[in-house]
Structure formats: structure tokens, C-alpha cells
Amino acid sequence: MTSQKTSQTMKPATAAKKLNVYLEATPAEFQEGVVSRDELNALQADPPEWLRELRRNGPHPRQVVAARLGISIGGLARGGITDPLTTDQINELKADGPEWLERERATQADHRREVARVKAKKAEPRGSRA
């Protein structure tokens, strides 16, 4: 007897998250089906036009919007951004430079510096710590 290896599948929402796209902007057949690991790998390796278009112009999910603005997802919420944004809307926000965005970028920069400091401290040999 040989055992058949079944392909691992995921919900469309999970696949969309892994592809960094907004699920509601994907084609209906993507939203209504299941995605196998092999299909996900194929989409990542050779994205179809609809996926390239979504990645290029959006609308983008919150994690992509936050990354493109250089802030956290929480910073988006504090700035009142709750909906997905297109690339043009993100670029407009960057160009306008509202106060909340500058504040959140500074907060994010402080956080990154602190993470780097803690990491460097943990990397020090035990005897050299003060």
C-alpha cells in the first residue's frame, strides 16, 4: 500500500496575507476557492497580471500600507487610517507629510533603535557587561 500525500491547502484570506494583497481586491475565483501550497508557490514564483497589478497599485492591506509609510499598524490606527489604501493614496500621504505621520515615523525609528540596542547588548560577552 502506498500512501497518497495530500497537498496542504489554506483559506483565501491566509493566501492573500502571505501574498501581501488585500483579499477583497483579488478575483472572485481566488476569494471563493482554496489555495494549495503548490498554487501559492506558483503565484509567488510567477505572479499573474492581476497579482502584479495589485502589488503595484493596490489597494494594499494595512501591513503593506504601514510598511510603505515606515510606521506600525498601530500607528495607522492612531492616524485614523482604517481602510486599505492605493499606492497613489500612500504617495499623497508621504508628500503631504501630516504631523501624525511624522510623529509615528519618529516613534518607529525610536523603537528600531531600542530593538537594535537590546540585541547588541545580548550579543556582548557576559564578562564585559556593566
Image (cartoon, grey):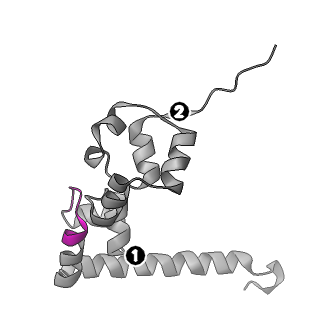
The front one of 63 and 12 is 12
Look at mark 2 in the image and give the residue it sits on. 9
Mark 2 or 1: the one toward you: 2
The picture places residue 66, in percent across and down from the top left corner, at: 34, 66
Q: Residue at x 53, y 33 (%)?
A: 9
Q: Quadrant of residue 78?
A: bottom left
The picture places residue 31, in percent across and down from the top left corner, at: 33, 37
2 and 1 marks in contact (CB < 8 Å): no
Drawn side of residue 105 relative to residue 42, left or right = left
In magenta, the rendered stretch is 81-89
Q: Residue at x 33, y 35 (%)?
A: 29
Q: Residue at x 31, y 56 (%)?
A: 61
Q: Quadrant of residue 28?
A: top left
Q: Is residue 71 visible?
A: no
Image quadrant for the N terminus?
Answer: top right
Q: Main secondary structure of the magenta part?
A: loop
The picture places residue 98, in percent across and down from the top left corner, at: 17, 80
Q: Is residue 98 visible?
A: yes
Look at mark 1 in the image and give the residue it sits on. 108
User: Judging from the image, what secondary structure is the residue with disc 1 in?
Assistant: helix
- The reply to whether the magenta stretch includes residue 15 is no
Image quadrant for the C terminus?
Answer: bottom right
Report the amino acid beneath label 1.
Gln
14 lies above or below 50: above
User: Judging from the image, what secondary structure is the residue with disc 2 in?
Assistant: strand
